[in-house]
Protein backbone atom coordinates (compact mmCIF):
# COMPACT_ATOMS: atom_id res chain seq x y z
CA UNK A 1 0.00 0.00 0.00
CA UNK A 2 1.14 3.59 -0.68
CA UNK A 3 2.34 5.50 2.38
CA UNK A 4 0.05 7.89 4.19
CA UNK A 5 0.86 11.59 4.29
CA UNK A 6 1.64 11.27 8.01
CA UNK A 7 4.07 8.42 7.26
CA UNK A 8 5.77 10.37 4.47
CA UNK A 9 6.07 13.41 6.75
CA UNK A 10 7.66 11.22 9.41
CA UNK A 11 10.12 9.78 6.86
CA UNK A 12 11.03 13.30 5.72
CA UNK A 13 11.77 14.44 9.25
CA UNK A 14 13.72 11.25 10.04
CA UNK A 15 15.80 11.88 6.86
CA UNK A 16 14.73 8.52 5.43
CA UNK A 17 13.72 10.44 2.32
CA UNK A 18 14.02 13.98 1.03
CA UNK A 19 11.34 16.09 -0.60
CA UNK A 20 13.50 16.10 -3.72
CA UNK A 21 13.55 12.28 -3.78
CA UNK A 22 9.78 12.05 -3.22
CA UNK A 23 9.19 14.59 -5.98
CA UNK A 24 11.52 12.86 -8.43
CA UNK A 25 9.78 9.57 -7.72
CA UNK A 26 6.34 11.14 -8.24
CA UNK A 27 7.45 12.69 -11.53
CA UNK A 28 8.87 9.33 -12.65
CA UNK A 29 5.60 7.56 -11.80
CA UNK A 30 3.63 10.25 -13.63
CA UNK A 31 5.74 9.73 -16.77
CA UNK A 32 5.53 5.95 -16.46
CA UNK A 33 1.72 6.19 -16.36
CA UNK A 34 1.21 8.66 -19.19
CA UNK A 35 -1.19 6.06 -20.61
CA UNK A 36 -3.72 7.33 -18.05
CA UNK A 37 -3.56 10.88 -19.49
CA UNK A 38 -4.06 12.17 -15.94
CA UNK A 39 -1.93 15.29 -16.42
CA UNK A 40 -2.24 18.27 -18.72
CA UNK A 41 1.03 19.84 -17.56
CA UNK A 42 3.95 18.34 -15.66
CA UNK A 43 6.41 20.97 -14.49
CA UNK A 44 9.52 19.17 -13.25
CA UNK A 45 11.54 22.40 -12.99
CA UNK A 46 9.07 24.19 -10.74
CA UNK A 47 8.42 20.99 -8.76
CA UNK A 48 12.08 20.30 -8.04
CA UNK A 49 12.69 23.94 -7.09
CA UNK A 50 9.75 23.74 -4.65
CA UNK A 51 11.09 20.42 -3.34
CA UNK A 52 14.49 22.00 -2.65
CA UNK A 53 12.81 24.80 -0.73
CA UNK A 54 10.84 22.20 1.23
CA UNK A 55 14.02 20.26 2.02
CA UNK A 56 15.64 23.46 3.31
CA UNK A 57 12.67 24.31 5.47
CA UNK A 58 12.41 20.74 6.84
CA UNK A 59 16.14 20.86 7.71
CA UNK A 60 15.45 24.17 9.47
CA UNK A 61 12.80 22.42 11.57
CA UNK A 62 9.55 22.99 9.61
CA UNK A 63 6.91 20.79 11.19
CA UNK A 64 4.05 21.59 8.83
CA UNK A 65 2.45 18.24 7.96
CA UNK A 66 2.49 18.76 4.17
CA UNK A 67 6.05 20.10 3.88
CA UNK A 68 7.81 18.20 1.10
CA UNK A 69 4.76 16.10 0.11
CA UNK A 70 4.24 15.95 -3.68
CA UNK A 71 0.75 16.45 -5.10
CA UNK A 72 -1.07 17.69 -8.19
CA UNK A 73 -3.46 20.62 -8.68
CA UNK A 74 -6.58 20.25 -10.77
CA UNK A 75 -5.95 22.46 -13.81
CA UNK A 76 -8.73 24.81 -12.71
CA UNK A 77 -6.61 26.54 -10.06
CA UNK A 78 -4.62 29.48 -11.41
CA UNK A 79 -0.88 29.01 -10.96
CA UNK A 80 1.37 32.04 -11.40
CA UNK A 81 3.65 31.45 -14.38
CA UNK A 82 2.36 27.91 -15.01
CA UNK A 83 -0.16 27.28 -17.79
CA UNK A 84 -3.74 26.87 -16.52
CA UNK A 85 -6.08 25.51 -19.18
CA UNK A 86 -9.28 24.32 -17.44
CA UNK A 87 -8.95 21.57 -20.08
CA UNK A 88 -10.24 23.99 -22.72
CA UNK A 89 -8.89 25.07 -26.05
CA UNK A 90 -10.05 28.52 -24.95
CA UNK A 91 -7.29 28.62 -22.31
CA UNK A 92 -4.79 26.31 -24.02
CA UNK A 93 -2.04 28.94 -23.76
CA UNK A 94 -3.23 30.87 -20.70
CA UNK A 95 -0.45 31.52 -18.17
CA UNK A 96 -2.01 33.29 -15.17
CA UNK A 97 -0.18 36.24 -13.61
CA UNK A 98 -1.31 35.23 -10.10
CA UNK A 99 -1.92 32.23 -7.82
CA UNK A 100 -5.28 30.96 -6.61
CA UNK A 101 -5.80 31.13 -2.83
CA UNK A 102 -5.63 27.33 -2.65
CA UNK A 103 -2.31 27.41 -4.52
CA UNK A 104 -0.93 30.06 -2.14
CA UNK A 105 -2.01 28.08 0.90
CA UNK A 106 -0.46 24.80 -0.21
CA UNK A 107 2.71 26.67 -1.23
CA UNK A 108 2.84 28.23 2.24
CA UNK A 109 2.51 24.71 3.68
CA UNK A 110 5.54 23.77 1.52
CA UNK A 111 3.66 21.01 -0.28
CA UNK A 112 5.19 20.34 -3.72
CA UNK A 113 2.98 20.57 -6.81
CA UNK A 114 4.28 18.44 -9.69
CA UNK A 115 1.84 19.85 -12.25
CA UNK A 116 -1.74 20.22 -13.35
CA UNK A 117 -4.29 17.43 -13.58
CA UNK A 118 -6.63 16.72 -16.50
CA UNK A 119 -10.35 17.37 -16.02
CA UNK A 120 -13.59 17.92 -17.92
CA UNK A 121 -13.53 21.23 -19.77
CA UNK A 122 -14.49 24.04 -17.35
CA UNK A 123 -15.44 21.24 -14.89
CA UNK A 124 -18.50 20.36 -16.98
CA UNK A 125 -18.76 16.61 -17.06
CA UNK A 126 -18.99 13.39 -15.09
CA UNK A 127 -16.52 11.23 -17.01
CA UNK A 128 -13.50 13.37 -17.90
CA UNK A 129 -14.27 12.73 -21.57
CA UNK A 130 -15.01 16.44 -22.17
CA UNK A 131 -11.34 17.47 -22.05
CA UNK A 132 -9.66 19.27 -24.95
CA UNK A 133 -6.59 17.23 -23.94
CA UNK A 134 -8.31 13.85 -24.26
CA UNK A 135 -10.07 11.49 -21.89
CA UNK A 136 -8.47 10.18 -18.69
CA UNK A 137 -8.44 6.38 -18.15
CA UNK A 138 -9.52 4.71 -14.94
CA UNK A 139 -6.49 3.03 -13.30
CA UNK A 140 -8.70 0.06 -12.30
CA UNK A 141 -9.75 -0.61 -15.90
CA UNK A 142 -8.32 1.40 -18.78
CA UNK A 143 -11.48 0.86 -20.84
CA UNK A 144 -13.50 2.81 -18.26
CA UNK A 145 -13.85 6.45 -17.21
CA UNK A 146 -12.30 7.74 -13.97
CA UNK A 147 -15.36 9.93 -13.33
CA UNK A 148 -15.37 13.68 -13.54
CA UNK A 149 -14.82 16.40 -13.54
CA UNK A 150 -11.76 15.92 -11.29
CA UNK A 151 -10.85 12.73 -13.18
CA UNK A 152 -7.13 13.42 -13.58
CA UNK A 153 -6.82 14.21 -9.88
CA UNK A 154 -8.57 10.96 -8.93
CA UNK A 155 -6.62 8.80 -11.40
CA UNK A 156 -3.28 10.26 -10.24
CA UNK A 157 -4.04 9.43 -6.61
CA UNK A 158 -5.53 5.99 -7.33
CA UNK A 159 -2.52 5.03 -9.47
CA UNK A 160 -0.21 5.94 -6.58
CA UNK A 161 1.48 8.78 -8.51
CA UNK A 162 0.83 11.34 -5.75
CA UNK A 163 -0.62 10.95 -2.25
CA UNK A 164 -3.18 13.70 -2.78
CA UNK A 165 -4.65 16.07 -5.34
CA UNK A 166 -6.78 19.18 -5.26
CA UNK A 167 -10.17 19.09 -6.92
CA UNK A 168 -13.37 21.06 -7.26
CA UNK A 169 -16.95 19.92 -6.84
CA UNK A 170 -19.90 21.77 -8.40
CA UNK A 171 -22.28 18.79 -8.68
CA UNK A 172 -20.18 15.81 -7.54
CA UNK A 173 -16.87 16.44 -9.31
CA UNK A 174 -14.72 15.36 -6.35
CA UNK A 175 -16.93 12.66 -4.85
CA UNK A 176 -17.92 10.78 -8.02
CA UNK A 177 -14.35 10.37 -9.40
CA UNK A 178 -13.20 9.42 -5.88
CA UNK A 179 -15.87 6.70 -5.88
CA UNK A 180 -15.01 5.47 -9.40
CA UNK A 181 -11.29 5.33 -8.60
CA UNK A 182 -11.51 3.77 -5.12
CA UNK A 183 -10.14 6.72 -3.16
CA UNK A 184 -11.42 9.25 -0.61
CA UNK A 185 -12.69 12.67 -1.68
CA UNK A 186 -14.13 15.48 0.43
CA UNK A 187 -16.21 18.41 -0.75
CA UNK A 188 -16.33 20.85 2.16
CA UNK A 189 -19.12 23.26 3.01
CA UNK A 190 -19.64 25.98 0.39
CA UNK A 191 -17.44 28.93 1.38
CA UNK A 192 -15.03 26.90 3.53
CA UNK A 193 -12.29 26.99 0.86
CA UNK A 194 -11.61 30.23 -1.02
CA UNK A 195 -12.66 30.34 -4.68
CA UNK A 196 -10.18 33.14 -5.42
CA UNK A 197 -8.27 32.11 -8.55
CA UNK A 198 -10.42 29.00 -9.06
CA UNK A 199 -11.84 29.30 -12.56
CA UNK A 200 -15.59 29.78 -12.20
CA UNK A 201 -18.21 27.38 -13.55
CA UNK A 202 -21.31 27.87 -11.36
CA UNK A 203 -20.37 30.30 -8.61
CA UNK A 204 -23.10 29.48 -6.08
CA UNK A 205 -22.15 25.77 -6.26
CA UNK A 206 -18.37 25.62 -6.95
CA UNK A 207 -16.31 24.30 -4.06
CA UNK A 208 -12.61 23.41 -3.75
CA UNK A 209 -11.65 20.21 -1.94
CA UNK A 210 -9.33 17.23 -1.68
CA UNK A 211 -8.84 13.76 -3.19
CA UNK A 212 -6.53 11.40 -1.27
CA UNK A 213 -6.23 7.77 -0.18
CA UNK A 214 -7.77 8.14 3.26
CA UNK A 215 -9.87 10.43 5.42
CA UNK A 216 -6.81 11.03 7.63
CA UNK A 217 -4.90 12.31 4.59
CA UNK A 218 -7.86 14.46 3.53
CA UNK A 219 -7.95 15.96 7.04
CA UNK A 220 -4.31 17.02 6.77
CA UNK A 221 -4.80 18.66 3.37
CA UNK A 222 -8.16 20.30 4.06
CA UNK A 223 -6.64 21.82 7.19
CA UNK A 224 -4.06 23.55 5.01
CA UNK A 225 -6.56 24.62 2.31
CA UNK A 226 -9.49 25.90 4.35
CA UNK A 227 -9.91 29.33 5.87
CA UNK A 228 -11.29 32.79 5.32
CA UNK A 229 -10.14 34.86 2.36
CA UNK A 230 -11.42 38.42 1.94
CA UNK A 231 -10.78 38.21 -1.83
CA UNK A 232 -13.67 35.75 -2.19
CA UNK A 233 -16.84 37.53 -1.02
CA UNK A 234 -18.49 34.14 -0.34
CA UNK A 235 -15.61 32.83 1.76
CA UNK A 236 -16.90 32.17 5.26
CA UNK A 237 -15.31 34.03 8.15
CA UNK A 238 -15.52 31.55 10.99
CA UNK A 239 -12.86 29.51 12.81
CA UNK A 240 -11.66 26.38 11.06
CA UNK A 241 -11.96 23.16 13.03
CA UNK A 242 -8.87 21.06 13.77
CA UNK A 243 -9.72 18.22 11.38
CA UNK A 244 -6.81 16.00 12.41
CA UNK A 245 -7.48 16.28 16.15
CA UNK A 246 -11.13 15.40 15.52
CA UNK A 247 -10.34 12.11 13.76
CA UNK A 248 -10.25 10.18 17.05
CA UNK A 249 -13.98 10.73 17.69
CA UNK A 250 -15.56 7.27 17.48
CA UNK A 251 -18.79 6.24 15.79
CA UNK A 252 -20.31 5.41 19.18
CA UNK A 253 -23.72 7.04 19.44
CA UNK A 254 -23.57 8.58 15.95
CA UNK A 255 -26.92 8.50 14.15
CA UNK A 256 -26.56 7.83 10.43
CA UNK A 257 -29.63 8.40 8.28
CA UNK A 258 -29.98 6.11 5.29
CA UNK A 259 -31.61 8.17 2.56
CA UNK A 260 -34.05 5.83 0.85
CA UNK A 261 -34.14 8.03 -2.28
CA UNK A 262 -30.41 7.40 -2.80
CA UNK A 263 -31.13 3.71 -3.33
CA UNK A 264 -33.61 4.36 -6.15
CA UNK A 265 -34.28 2.51 -9.38
CA UNK A 266 -31.05 3.44 -11.18
CA UNK A 267 -28.76 2.11 -8.44
CA UNK A 268 -26.96 -1.07 -9.47
CA UNK A 269 -27.62 -3.98 -7.06
CA UNK A 270 -23.88 -4.53 -6.53
CA UNK A 271 -23.40 -0.90 -5.57
CA UNK A 272 -26.35 -0.94 -3.17
CA UNK A 273 -25.11 -4.18 -1.57
CA UNK A 274 -21.59 -2.84 -0.99
CA UNK A 275 -22.91 0.39 0.51
CA UNK A 276 -25.35 -1.45 2.78
CA UNK A 277 -22.54 -3.75 3.95
CA UNK A 278 -20.37 -0.72 4.71
CA UNK A 279 -23.20 0.84 6.71
CA UNK A 280 -23.65 -2.43 8.62
CA UNK A 281 -19.94 -2.14 9.49
CA UNK A 282 -20.58 1.39 10.82
CA UNK A 283 -23.35 -0.06 12.97
CA UNK A 284 -20.92 -2.65 14.37
CA UNK A 285 -18.60 0.24 15.26
CA UNK A 286 -21.31 1.86 17.37
CA UNK A 287 -23.35 3.96 14.96
CA UNK A 288 -27.13 3.78 14.87
CA UNK A 289 -28.74 3.45 11.45
CA UNK A 290 -32.02 5.24 10.86
CA UNK A 291 -34.14 5.49 7.70
CA UNK A 292 -34.61 9.05 6.49
CA UNK A 293 -36.39 10.54 3.52
CA UNK A 294 -35.40 13.43 1.28
CA UNK A 295 -38.77 13.74 -0.47
CA UNK A 296 -37.66 16.32 -3.05
CA UNK A 297 -34.51 14.43 -4.11
CA UNK A 298 -35.97 13.82 -7.59
CA UNK A 299 -35.96 17.57 -8.24
CA UNK A 300 -32.19 17.85 -7.75
CA UNK A 301 -31.10 16.88 -11.28
CA UNK A 302 -33.61 19.13 -13.08
CA UNK A 303 -32.85 22.04 -10.73
CA UNK A 304 -29.10 21.57 -11.04
CA UNK A 305 -29.19 21.38 -14.83
CA UNK A 306 -30.93 24.75 -14.93
CA UNK A 307 -29.02 26.60 -12.20
CA UNK A 308 -25.50 25.41 -13.12
CA UNK A 309 -25.85 26.18 -16.87
CA UNK A 310 -27.47 29.55 -16.05
CA UNK A 311 -24.53 30.54 -13.87
CA UNK A 312 -22.09 29.08 -16.41
CA UNK A 313 -23.59 31.10 -19.27
CA UNK A 314 -22.93 34.23 -17.24
CA UNK A 315 -19.46 33.23 -15.95
CA UNK A 316 -18.20 32.14 -19.36
CA UNK A 317 -19.31 35.37 -21.04
CA UNK A 318 -15.86 36.71 -20.11
CA UNK A 319 -14.19 34.53 -22.76
CA UNK A 320 -14.53 36.82 -25.72
CA UNK A 321 -11.18 36.63 -27.47
CA UNK A 322 -10.24 40.15 -26.39
CA UNK A 323 -8.39 40.15 -23.07
CA UNK A 324 -7.02 36.60 -22.82
CA UNK A 325 -7.69 33.14 -24.15
CA UNK A 326 -8.31 31.92 -27.68
CA UNK A 327 -8.88 34.44 -30.47
CA UNK A 328 -10.05 33.37 -33.92
CA UNK A 329 -7.92 34.20 -36.93
CA UNK A 330 -8.58 37.36 -38.93
CA UNK A 331 -11.81 38.64 -37.31
CA UNK A 332 -13.85 40.86 -39.63
CA UNK A 333 -15.98 42.62 -37.01
CA UNK A 334 -16.21 42.70 -33.23
CA UNK A 335 -19.24 40.40 -33.40
CA UNK A 336 -17.32 38.00 -35.62
CA UNK A 337 -14.40 38.09 -33.16
CA UNK A 338 -16.64 37.17 -30.21
CA UNK A 339 -18.65 34.50 -31.99
CA UNK A 340 -15.89 32.67 -33.81
CA UNK A 341 -13.45 32.85 -30.85
CA UNK A 342 -16.07 31.28 -28.59
CA UNK A 343 -17.19 28.79 -31.23
CA UNK A 344 -13.61 27.57 -31.74
CA UNK A 345 -12.51 27.85 -28.10
CA UNK A 346 -15.32 25.93 -26.36
CA UNK A 347 -16.09 22.22 -26.66
CA UNK A 348 -19.47 20.66 -27.36
CA UNK A 349 -20.69 20.20 -23.77
CA UNK A 350 -19.60 23.68 -22.69
CA UNK A 351 -21.48 25.20 -25.63
CA UNK A 352 -24.53 23.08 -24.82
CA UNK A 353 -24.60 24.32 -21.23
CA UNK A 354 -24.07 27.94 -22.26
CA UNK A 355 -27.04 27.66 -24.64
CA UNK A 356 -29.25 25.97 -22.02
CA UNK A 357 -28.29 28.62 -19.45
CA UNK A 358 -28.84 31.48 -21.86
CA UNK A 359 -32.27 30.08 -22.73
CA UNK A 360 -33.21 29.64 -19.05
CA UNK A 361 -32.24 33.23 -18.27
CA UNK A 362 -33.75 34.82 -21.37
CA UNK A 363 -36.83 37.04 -21.34
CA UNK A 364 -40.01 34.98 -21.26
CA UNK A 365 -38.39 31.84 -19.86
CA UNK A 366 -36.70 33.15 -16.68
CA UNK A 367 -39.65 32.50 -14.37
CA UNK A 368 -40.46 29.08 -15.80
CA UNK A 369 -36.89 27.78 -15.61
CA UNK A 370 -34.40 29.74 -13.53
CA UNK A 371 -36.74 31.04 -10.85
CA UNK A 372 -38.53 27.69 -10.62
CA UNK A 373 -35.19 25.89 -10.22
CA UNK A 374 -34.29 28.28 -7.41
CA UNK A 375 -37.59 27.43 -5.70
CA UNK A 376 -36.76 23.74 -6.07
CA UNK A 377 -33.34 24.45 -4.59
CA UNK A 378 -35.05 25.79 -1.46
CA UNK A 379 -37.19 22.67 -0.90
CA UNK A 380 -34.19 20.41 -1.57
CA UNK A 381 -32.13 22.30 1.03
CA UNK A 382 -35.05 22.22 3.48
CA UNK A 383 -35.22 18.40 3.17
CA UNK A 384 -31.69 18.25 4.57
CA UNK A 385 -32.54 20.66 7.42
CA UNK A 386 -35.50 18.45 8.31
CA UNK A 387 -33.43 15.23 8.15
CA UNK A 388 -30.58 16.66 10.20
CA UNK A 389 -33.11 17.34 12.93
CA UNK A 390 -33.07 13.57 13.52
CA UNK A 391 -29.64 12.33 12.41
CA UNK A 392 -25.96 13.36 12.50
CA UNK A 393 -25.01 12.19 9.01
CA UNK A 394 -26.87 11.08 5.87
CA UNK A 395 -25.54 8.14 3.84
CA UNK A 396 -26.02 6.51 0.46
CA UNK A 397 -24.11 5.41 -2.63
CA UNK A 398 -22.01 8.25 -4.08
CA UNK A 399 -22.86 7.13 -7.60
CA UNK A 400 -25.63 4.77 -8.73
CA UNK A 401 -23.13 2.76 -10.79
CA UNK A 402 -19.51 1.75 -10.85
CA UNK A 403 -17.22 3.40 -13.42
CA UNK A 404 -18.82 3.10 -16.85
CA UNK A 405 -17.13 2.40 -20.17
CA UNK A 406 -15.37 5.15 -22.09
CA UNK A 407 -17.78 6.35 -24.78
CA UNK A 408 -20.79 4.66 -23.15
CA UNK A 409 -22.66 7.89 -22.38
CA UNK A 410 -20.97 10.46 -24.61
CA UNK A 411 -23.75 10.50 -27.19
CA UNK A 412 -26.48 10.96 -24.59
CA UNK A 413 -26.04 14.02 -22.35
CA UNK A 414 -29.08 13.11 -20.26
CA UNK A 415 -27.68 9.68 -19.39
CA UNK A 416 -24.46 11.41 -18.34
CA UNK A 417 -26.37 13.93 -16.19
CA UNK A 418 -28.21 11.06 -14.47
CA UNK A 419 -24.85 9.85 -13.11
CA UNK A 420 -24.97 12.86 -10.74
CA UNK A 421 -28.30 11.87 -9.17
CA UNK A 422 -26.91 11.33 -5.64
CA UNK A 423 -24.39 14.16 -5.56
CA UNK A 424 -25.93 17.38 -6.93
CA UNK A 425 -28.39 18.01 -4.06
CA UNK A 426 -25.44 18.45 -1.69
CA UNK A 427 -24.12 21.33 -3.81
CA UNK A 428 -27.54 22.93 -4.12
CA UNK A 429 -27.75 22.93 -0.31
CA UNK A 430 -24.07 23.93 0.14
CA UNK A 431 -23.33 21.02 2.50
CA UNK A 432 -20.09 19.10 3.13
CA UNK A 433 -19.88 15.48 1.94
CA UNK A 434 -17.26 12.79 1.58
CA UNK A 435 -16.96 9.70 -0.61
CA UNK A 436 -15.04 6.77 0.84
CA UNK A 437 -14.19 3.37 -0.65
CA UNK A 438 -16.84 0.89 0.51
CA UNK A 439 -16.04 -2.28 -1.39
CA UNK A 440 -16.30 -3.55 -4.95
CA UNK A 441 -18.91 -4.50 -7.49
CA UNK A 442 -17.84 -6.29 -10.70
CA UNK A 443 -14.23 -5.81 -9.49
CA UNK A 444 -14.66 -2.04 -9.60
CA UNK A 445 -14.64 0.31 -6.59
CA UNK A 446 -17.85 1.49 -4.94
CA UNK A 447 -18.09 4.76 -2.99
CA UNK A 448 -20.11 5.43 0.16
CA UNK A 449 -21.23 9.04 0.44
CA UNK A 450 -21.64 10.62 3.86
CA UNK A 451 -23.26 14.06 4.11
CA UNK A 452 -23.09 16.35 7.15
CA UNK A 453 -24.74 19.61 8.21
CA UNK A 454 -22.90 22.78 7.11
CA UNK A 455 -19.45 23.27 8.70
CA UNK A 456 -19.33 19.77 10.21
CA UNK A 457 -16.39 18.54 8.11
CA UNK A 458 -14.82 17.17 11.31
CA UNK A 459 -17.78 14.86 11.87
CA UNK A 460 -17.51 13.55 8.32
CA UNK A 461 -13.76 13.03 8.45
CA UNK A 462 -13.92 11.35 11.87
CA UNK A 463 -16.67 8.95 10.80
CA UNK A 464 -14.79 8.11 7.60
CA UNK A 465 -11.53 7.64 9.51
CA UNK A 466 -13.12 5.34 12.08
CA UNK A 467 -14.58 3.25 9.25
CA UNK A 468 -11.16 3.13 7.58
CA UNK A 469 -9.47 2.03 10.82
CA UNK A 470 -11.72 -1.03 10.78
CA UNK A 471 -11.71 -1.76 7.03
CA UNK A 472 -9.10 -1.96 4.28
CA UNK A 473 -11.05 -0.91 1.16
CA UNK A 474 -9.13 2.37 1.01
CA UNK A 475 -5.81 0.51 0.96
CA UNK A 476 -6.65 -1.48 -2.20
CA UNK A 477 -4.72 -0.43 -5.27
CA UNK A 478 -5.24 -1.21 -8.94
CA UNK A 479 -2.61 -3.36 -10.63
CA UNK A 480 -0.10 -1.11 -12.38
CA UNK B 1 -41.25 20.33 -25.98
CA UNK B 2 -39.79 21.46 -29.26
CA UNK B 3 -37.67 24.47 -30.02
CA UNK B 4 -37.66 26.01 -33.48
CA UNK B 5 -34.50 27.01 -35.28
CA UNK B 6 -35.46 30.70 -35.06
CA UNK B 7 -35.34 30.46 -31.27
CA UNK B 8 -32.02 28.62 -31.47
CA UNK B 9 -30.60 31.39 -33.63
CA UNK B 10 -31.81 34.01 -31.14
CA UNK B 11 -30.32 32.17 -28.12
CA UNK B 12 -27.05 31.54 -29.95
CA UNK B 13 -26.87 35.22 -30.82
CA UNK B 14 -27.39 36.15 -27.13
CA UNK B 15 -24.66 33.67 -26.13
CA UNK B 16 -22.33 34.83 -28.93
CA UNK B 17 -22.01 31.26 -30.18
CA UNK B 18 -22.13 30.29 -33.83
CA UNK B 19 -24.97 28.01 -34.92
CA UNK B 20 -25.23 27.49 -38.65
CA UNK B 21 -28.32 26.32 -40.48
CA UNK B 22 -27.02 22.76 -40.70
CA UNK B 23 -26.36 22.35 -36.96
CA UNK B 24 -29.37 24.38 -35.76
CA UNK B 25 -31.81 21.46 -36.07
CA UNK B 26 -29.56 19.12 -34.12
CA UNK B 27 -28.88 21.76 -31.47
CA UNK B 28 -32.61 22.43 -31.17
CA UNK B 29 -33.25 18.74 -30.55
CA UNK B 30 -30.54 18.49 -27.89
CA UNK B 31 -31.66 21.64 -26.15
CA UNK B 32 -35.27 20.46 -26.14
CA UNK B 33 -34.27 17.24 -24.38
CA UNK B 34 -32.37 19.11 -21.65
CA UNK B 35 -35.25 21.53 -21.22
CA UNK B 36 -37.69 18.60 -21.00
CA UNK B 37 -35.63 17.46 -18.02
CA UNK B 38 -35.98 20.92 -16.50
CA UNK B 39 -39.68 20.76 -17.33
CA UNK B 40 -40.08 18.20 -14.53
CA UNK B 41 -39.98 21.20 -12.19
CA UNK B 42 -43.25 22.43 -13.67
CA UNK B 43 -45.19 19.57 -12.06
CA UNK B 44 -43.68 20.08 -8.59
CA UNK B 45 -45.70 22.06 -6.04
CA UNK B 46 -43.28 25.00 -5.81
CA UNK B 47 -45.62 28.00 -6.07
CA UNK B 48 -45.05 30.36 -3.18
CA UNK B 49 -41.67 28.87 -2.23
CA UNK B 50 -39.04 31.58 -1.80
CA UNK B 51 -36.31 31.20 -4.44
CA UNK B 52 -32.87 30.25 -3.06
CA UNK B 53 -29.97 31.87 -4.89
CA UNK B 54 -27.18 30.95 -2.56
CA UNK B 55 -26.34 28.27 0.05
CA UNK B 56 -25.78 30.64 2.96
CA UNK B 57 -28.10 33.41 3.98
CA UNK B 58 -25.22 35.76 4.62
CA UNK B 59 -24.96 39.49 4.10
CA UNK B 60 -22.66 40.69 1.38
CA UNK B 61 -19.13 41.25 2.66
CA UNK B 62 -18.04 44.86 3.10
CA UNK B 63 -14.56 46.25 2.98
CA UNK B 64 -12.97 49.63 3.48
CA UNK B 65 -13.19 51.93 0.45
CA UNK B 66 -9.44 51.80 -0.11
CA UNK B 67 -7.17 50.93 -3.02
CA UNK B 68 -6.06 47.29 -2.71
CA UNK B 69 -4.85 46.56 -6.25
CA UNK B 70 -1.58 47.74 -7.67
CA UNK B 71 -1.20 48.64 -11.35
CA UNK B 72 -0.58 45.37 -13.17
CA UNK B 73 -1.72 46.52 -16.57
CA UNK B 74 1.47 45.42 -18.32
CA UNK B 75 1.17 41.83 -17.01
CA UNK B 76 -2.54 41.73 -17.88
CA UNK B 77 -2.14 43.23 -21.34
CA UNK B 78 0.61 40.70 -22.04
CA UNK B 79 -2.11 37.99 -21.92
CA UNK B 80 -4.14 39.62 -24.69
CA UNK B 81 -4.09 38.08 -28.17
CA UNK B 82 -3.69 41.61 -29.55
CA UNK B 83 -2.69 44.62 -27.43
CA UNK B 84 -1.21 47.81 -28.78
CA UNK B 85 -0.11 51.01 -27.07
CA UNK B 86 -1.45 49.89 -23.70
CA UNK B 87 -4.88 49.06 -25.14
CA UNK B 88 -6.76 45.92 -26.18
CA UNK B 89 -7.06 45.85 -29.96
CA UNK B 90 -10.28 44.70 -31.66
CA UNK B 91 -11.67 45.05 -35.19
CA UNK B 92 -12.90 48.51 -36.07
CA UNK B 93 -16.24 49.22 -34.37
CA UNK B 94 -17.16 52.62 -35.79
CA UNK B 95 -17.20 53.38 -39.47
Image (tube, helix red, strand yellow):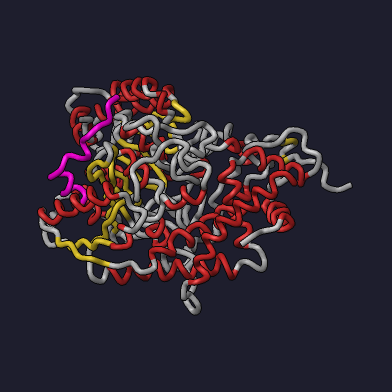
Q: Visible in this render: residue A418?
A: yes
Q: Quadrant of residue A146?
A: top left
Return the x and y of residue A94 as percentages of the image width and height.
57, 35
Q: Is residue A293 left or right of residue A198?
A: left
As displayed, is residue A123 above or below residue A451? above
- Reply yes or no: does residue B88 show up in magenta: no
Residue occupying image coordinates x 34% and y 31%: A141
Q: Is residue B31 left or right of residue A197?
A: right
Query: Which sits in the foreground, A164 or A412?
Result: A412
Q: Visible in this render: residue A225?
A: no
Return the x and y of residue A370 as percentages of the image width and height.
56, 65
Query: Which sits in the foreground, A116 or B14?
Result: B14
Return the residue found at the far bottom: B48
Query: Which sits in the foreground, A328 or B59?
Result: A328
Residue occupying image coordinates x 48% and y 45%: A125
Q: Which residues are magenta?
A: A464-480
Residue occupying image coordinates x 75% and y 36%: B85
Amino acid sequence: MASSIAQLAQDLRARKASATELTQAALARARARDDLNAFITLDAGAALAAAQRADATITAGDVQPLAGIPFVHKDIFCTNGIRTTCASRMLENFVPPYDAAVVERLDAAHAVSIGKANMDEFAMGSSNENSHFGAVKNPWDATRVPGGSSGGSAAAVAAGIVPFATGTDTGGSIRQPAAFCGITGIKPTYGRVSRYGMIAYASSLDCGGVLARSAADCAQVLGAMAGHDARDATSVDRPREDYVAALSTTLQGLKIGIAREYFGAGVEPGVAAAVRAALAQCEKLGATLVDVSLPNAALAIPAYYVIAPAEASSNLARYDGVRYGHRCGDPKTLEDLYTRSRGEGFGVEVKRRILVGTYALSAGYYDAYYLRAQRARRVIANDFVEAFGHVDLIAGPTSPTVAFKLGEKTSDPLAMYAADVNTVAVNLAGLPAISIPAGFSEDLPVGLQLIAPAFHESRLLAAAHQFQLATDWHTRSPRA
Amino acid sequence: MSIDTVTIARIARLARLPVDARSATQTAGELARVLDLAGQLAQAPLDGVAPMAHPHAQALAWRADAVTESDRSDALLALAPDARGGLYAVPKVLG
